[in-house]
Amino acid sequence: MSKFIVGLTGGIGSGKTAASDWFKAQGVAIVDADVVSREVVEPGTPALAAIGAHFGSEVLQADGRLDRAALRRIVFDKPDERRWLEQLLHPLIAQEIVRQLAAATSAYAMLVSPLLFETGQKAFVKRTLLIDVPEDVQVARTATRDKVEEAQVKAIMAAQMSRADRRARADDIVVNDGTLAELHARLVPLHARYLELAQG
Ligand code: ATP
């Protein structure tokens, strides 16, 4: 079991996946909170059964999987329903994150989460790494990747924690404003430091 856990976070399209893919290639075990949040509602899980019973078949796709977009629309302007859903899912997600982190055998492990600072997930990590990016770069890269309007990306960013707040909270910051090769080069000394900290 890896005892030293680094939490990696950043805003939409900041480069969390680009960075965590590099750490993964160095042999670091990666637990992705977004992936876990989908795993806990896979067909056959008690959580999906509870959601189906509560909201009805309109939140299920024809193949029995959760229709996440439909669910988002339903809870969007209903704080009580949103709270019901969060009270069901957050403990399950936390439990599964802990289980996967406990199973990691690399020198240190990494929890990748867009909501590391906003949720209790920070409690699972010893150190935090922010993938930071100037807003104009963030908007351009996300709009290109998701094939959406820049205005839509800006609206999502406005609902997320501000860049300044994230920077104030992080132990380590890597600015991802160059090429992928430059990003990787900036991660090299951090990986070395985390290996050191994991041993000490
Ligand atoms: P999200 O939270 O939205 O899932 P993310 O933080 O995981 O996003 P990525 O998907 O890694 O971000 O990066 C966003 C987009 O920008 C991707 O298309 C990625 O390939 C691209 N990208 C990331 N870093 C760089 C870089 N240094 N140079 C060029 N493109 C990059």
Image: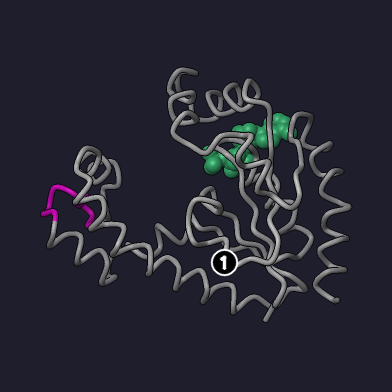
In the depicted structure, whether residue 9 falls above or below residue 165: below
Does the magenta segment cover residue 15? no
Location of the N terminus by quadrant is bottom right
Location of the C terminus by quadrant is bottom right
In the depicted structure, whether residue 128 falls above or below residue 176: below
In-image side of 66 versus 131 (left or right): left
Does the magenta segment cover residue 63? yes
Viewer-nearest residue: 169 or 97:
169
Residue 110, position in %: x, y? Answer: 66, 62
Q: Which amino acid lies under the numbered mark 1 shown in the image of this protein?
A: Ala
Residue 165, position in %: x, y? Answer: 60, 39
Secondary structure mostly taken by the magenta-highlighted segment of the chain: loop
Viewer-nearest residue: 167 or 28:
167
User: Which colour scheme appears in the figure?
Assistant: one colour
At x 76% / y 42%, what residue is drawn?
174
Residue 102, position in %: x, y? Answer: 59, 78
Residue 38, position in %: x, y? Answer: 40, 57
Element type at mark 1: helix
Viewer-nearest residue: 5 or 30:
5
Q: Residue furthest bottom?
A: 1
At x 77% / y 36%, what residue is drawn?
180
Viewer-nearest residue: 195 or 61:
195
In-image side of 125 versus 69 (left or right): right
From the image, tell me which residue sits under label 1. Answer: 123
Q: Residues within 10 Å of mark 1 (few under 14, many from 20)?
A: few
Magenta part of the chain? 55-64
In the depicted structure, whether residue 77 falls above or below residue 64: above
Q: Quadrant of ligand 1?
A: top right
